[in-house]
Image: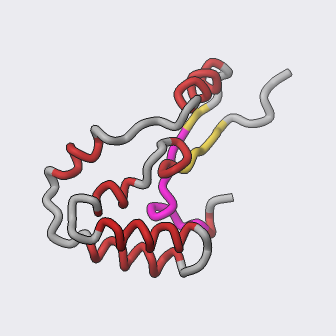
């Protein structure tokens, strides 16, 4: 029987990986705790996600690009993520990853 589905998309932050990258970046600024709190409230639906994203990104202003390499070393896959991706690929499924803040969530079904 042929697979009904051919593509699987994963959200990245706190799903495919264990961390929220914006929080890792913010930890390199004096605003780490504030960004983490905004993230927590946005993820729980207490505040508007889009507005929260703008607020968090504004708190990262001035962060040097070199921080991206440092943060990359702190990112870890969620338990079982690699195995799941490998199994999906063995079944000839395409696997993709996206971030909520990089897509128009209204167009993702």
Image point 61% across, 74% down: which residue? 45
Where residue 51 appears, x then y in whole percent?
Answer: 46, 81
Residue 64's image quarter? bottom left
Image point 36% across, 60% down: which residue? 22
Where residue 104 appears, x then y in whole percent?
Answer: 54, 67
- The magenta span reads 96-105
Residue 12 relative to residue 84: left or right: left
Examine the rendered structure and indicate whether residue 28 appears above or below residue 86. Answer: below
Where residue 73 appears, x then y in whole percent?
Answer: 28, 38
Residue 81's image quarter? top right
Q: Residue furthest front?
A: 33
The question of residue 21 being in magenta is answered with no
The question of residue 98 being in magenta is answered with yes
Image point 69% across, 58% down: which residue? 109
Image point 48% across, 76% down: which residue? 50
Where residue 9 appears, x then y in whole percent?
Answer: 60, 44
Number of marks present in the image shown: 0
- State the residue in front, 32 or 48: 32
Examine the rendered structure and indicate whether residue 45 appears above or below residue 1. Answer: below
């Amino acid at each position: 029987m042929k697979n009904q589905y051919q593509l699987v998309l994963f959200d990245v932050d706190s799903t495919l990986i264990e961390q929220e990258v914006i929080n890792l970046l913010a930890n390199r600024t004096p605003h780490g705790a504030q960004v983490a709190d905004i993230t927590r409230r946005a993820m729980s639906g207490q505040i508007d996600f889009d507005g929260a994203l703008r607020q968090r990104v504004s708190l990262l202003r001035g962060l040097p690009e070199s921080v991206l390499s440092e943060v990359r070393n702190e990112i870890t896959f969620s338990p079982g993520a690699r195995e799941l991706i490998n199994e999906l690929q063995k079944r000839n499924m395409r696997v993709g990853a996206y971030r909520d803040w990089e897509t128009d969530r209204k167009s993702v079904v």
